Image (cartoon, helix red, strand yellow):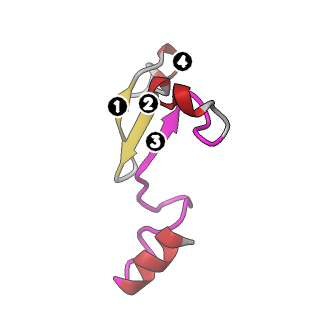
Amino acid sequence: MYTINSAKIGFEEKEKGSLEPGKLADLVVLSDDPYKVDPKNIRNIQTVLTMVGGKIVYINNPLFRKYP
């Protein structure tokens, strides 16, 4: 909801704002769900993968290493 509305304000909803084929994506894949982890262990959550502009820029998991 927040991302699509922000894209609409900037007249960029055709390029970004939702996860759809052909749109840019900035997202992260985390090792655990921060809403389900004991608050004391949130600091141990790791970033597994980061995408910026639809391109993978960081990988910290051997399962994803085959991607550029």
Percent x, y for residue 51?
39, 43
Q: Which mark is residue 47?
A: 2
Q: Which residue in the structure is indicated by mark 4?
A: 63
Dot placed on the residue nearer the N-terminal end, 2 or 4: 2
Query: Going by the image, does 30 lie left or right of 38?
Result: left
Percent x, y for residue 59?
39, 26
Q: Which residues are magenta?
A: 10-35
> In the structure shown, which secondary structural element does the residue marked by tag 1 occupy?
strand
The answer to whether marks 1 and 4 mark residues whose Cβ atoms lie closer than 8 Å is no
Dot placed on the residue nearer the N-terminal end, 3 or 2: 3
Mark 2 to mark 4 CA distance (whole Å): 14 Å
Dot placed on the residue nearer the N-terminal end, 3 or 1: 3
Q: Which mark is residue 28?
A: 3
Residue 27 belongs to the span the image colors magenta: yes
Query: Going by the image, does 12 lie left or right of 1?
Result: left
Tell me if mark 1 has few (under 14), some (14-19) or many (20+) residues whose alpha carbon lies within 10 angstroms of its own: some
